[in-house]
Amino acid sequence: GPEDIVQGNMRCILGLIWTIILRYEINRNGDGGDLLKWIQSKIPEYGIKNFTKDWNDGRALNALINALRPDLCKDHMDLDKKKKLANARRGINTADKEMGVDKLVLPEEMIHKRVDKQAMMTYLAQFRNLKDTNAAYRVRAFGEGLHKGIKETKAPFFVERPTDAKGEIKIEVLNEDGKEVSCDIGKAEAPEGYEKLAVSYVPQKAGVYKVHVTLDDKHVPGSVFTVVIEENLSIGGEGKVFCFFSTTSGNLKQRSDINNTKTLLTSKKVHLRKDFVPWIPVDIMDRKDREAVFTKAGTRKLPIVIIDDQYLGDYDTLLKLEEEGKLDVVLKMDQQELITLEEHKARLKLYSGSGNLM
């Protein structure tokens, strides 16, 4: 009675607390049947019949999380039953971090063959009582513009959501000073049952940008995105001389320019530099790398000569610099430590056709 509570009878107090939890948090029947039926409806493939041993290997917990949040624990069926502790720890931590489910049970307790039934019921009831008000997790934002970009160059990305994920999508791009950058937003072609937005912005200066993508003021997975905007596109040529050419060009002048460029740079002993990179044929480069070179140069006219990660020009540019006596200054050959021709020939055997060390 009341006197037990006043006198601090822990057994009675704990019993009262459990009765309240059972009555108002778990179900109205008092035996956990309602909660069990709900769980069975969510993960019928696991054949859950109790709140104890059926949860010992941690897989059912991961499955329940996935049933409520399809973006989480997608591989629950592939989890190793023998790795009970790892499975339970993953599920409990994920539910806590991503869904706000309190850690009322420890992983070590869940995998124990005599796990406390009442503790499990209380813990699992939290999943059923979650309010399904956040559809933001069903929205997907993706694209290069959410990760990196170049100053004064369009940075594109996409935002896609199921048509039944209602709400207002808001996109906000902030530069390093916290000032908002304007975006162009339009509709893009999407799979059936989805809506897709094509978004782009043009960063006016280098720095770290932040991109917020929300649905009804709730962040979508990955948001807030951190984007590194570079001053210019780097192809890894700092301190090096790159010469890109084509082995299949049918243009006679271009073929002549390529040969003349090789001859001119060889006369300057560029091939004997310690940081030498072989002439690189764009024909065998990956398309992404090839397009990066053309973007860096701002032209597709070959040969393309890049010095210290800056586009210098083609053969005509080199020839003009040579005639004006400026090419040696640009190449900085007086600052270079050269190797012997024999060492250079031995080094060539280590390179692939695309100019990379094998």
Image (cartoon, rainbow, N blue to C red):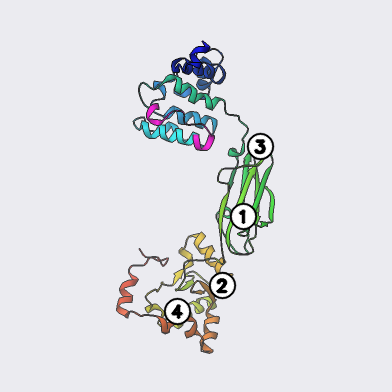
Q: Secondary structure at mark 4?
A: helix
Between the residue at mark 1 and the residue at mark 4, the CA separation in whole angstroms equals 38 Å
Mark closest to the chain's N terminus, 2 or 3? 3
Classify 249 as above or below 31: below
Between the residue at mark 1 and the residue at mark 3, the CA separation in whole angstroms equals 22 Å
- Nearer to me, 155 or 125: 125
Horizontal side of 107 relative to 4 (left or right) equals left
Classify 112 as above or below 86: above
Q: Which residue is mark 4?
A: 262
Tell whether label 1 touches label 2 (CB within 8 Å). Answer: no
- Nearer to me, 202 or 302: 202
Say what amino acid the circle numbered 3 marks: Thr
What residue occupies the far top of the structure in this picture?
1
The magenta segment: 96-109
Question: For mark 4, does the 10 Å Cα neighbourhood hold few (<14), some (14 to 19), or many (20 or more) residues?
Answer: some
Between the residue at mark 3 and the residue at mark 4, the CA separation in whole angstroms equals 57 Å
Q: Which residue is mark 1?
A: 156
| Residue 111: x %, y % from top left | 37, 27
**Mark closer to the observer (1, 4):** 1
What residue occupies the far bottom of the structure in this picture?
324
Is residue 80 in view?
A: no
| Residue 159: x %, y % from top left | 62, 46
Horizontal side of 343 relative to 139 (left or right) equals left
Say what amino acid the circle numbered 2 marks: Lys
Q: Secondary structure at mark 3?
A: loop
Q: Secondary structure at mark 2?
A: loop
What label does residue 130 carry, if any?
Answer: none
Q: Which residue is mark 3?
A: 163
